[in-house]
Image (cartoon, grey):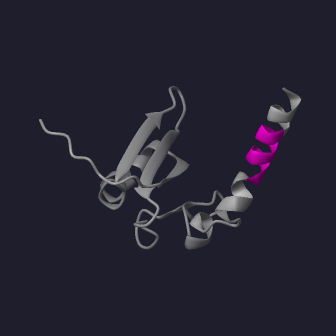
Amino acid sequence: ATLKVVPAHNLLEQTIVLTRDEAKNQLNTLLKRHKHVRYMWIPYEDAVVVVTNDDENDLPLLGPGTEVSDGKGGKKKIASVDDVTPKFSRNEQLAPLRNMLRNLLKAK
């Protein structure tokens, strides 16, 4: 077997909980729509944790398998463009960590 190297990329992980019947019914759709899918059955419960991972630049945001029950008879989207659009710039995201490191270095 030969390993293939791909450029570094970010993945968006989504976690949902489905009933066993929902997990069975959505199996083919989820496998077709997502790059990586992981199922974890909760023993003695009617619950399956489904974890998907997709390249953040190639998200399956539309169509079957991208909505789940909201628990109130309606549907909710697993992810939307707003969910993956950063609210802060990279510099703003890293500012608290940089400040903490500066303070730690000053303390030495």
**Of the pair 44 and 53, the residue shown nearer to us:** 53
Q: Position of residue 45 (x, y in %)?
A: 54, 32
Q: In the rendered structure, which segment of residues is drawn in magenta?
A: 95-102
Let me know if residue 99 is in the magenta part.
yes
**Of the pair 56 and 97, the residue shown nearer to us:** 97
Number of marks drawn = 0
Image position of 76 (left or right of 11) = right
Q: Position of residue 87 (x, y in %)?
A: 70, 67
**Residue drawn at (46%, 35%) of the image:** 40
Let me know if residue 27 is in the magenta part.
no
Image position of 3 (left or right of 57) = left
Compared with residue 65, is residue 49 higher up or lower down, i.e. above or below? above
Compared with residue 80, is residue 100 higher up or lower down, i.e. above or below? above
Q: Position of residue 108 (x, y in %)?
A: 84, 26
Identify the main secondary structure in magenta.
helix
Q: Residue 64 sits in which quadrant?
A: bottom left
Quadrant location of the N terminus?
top left
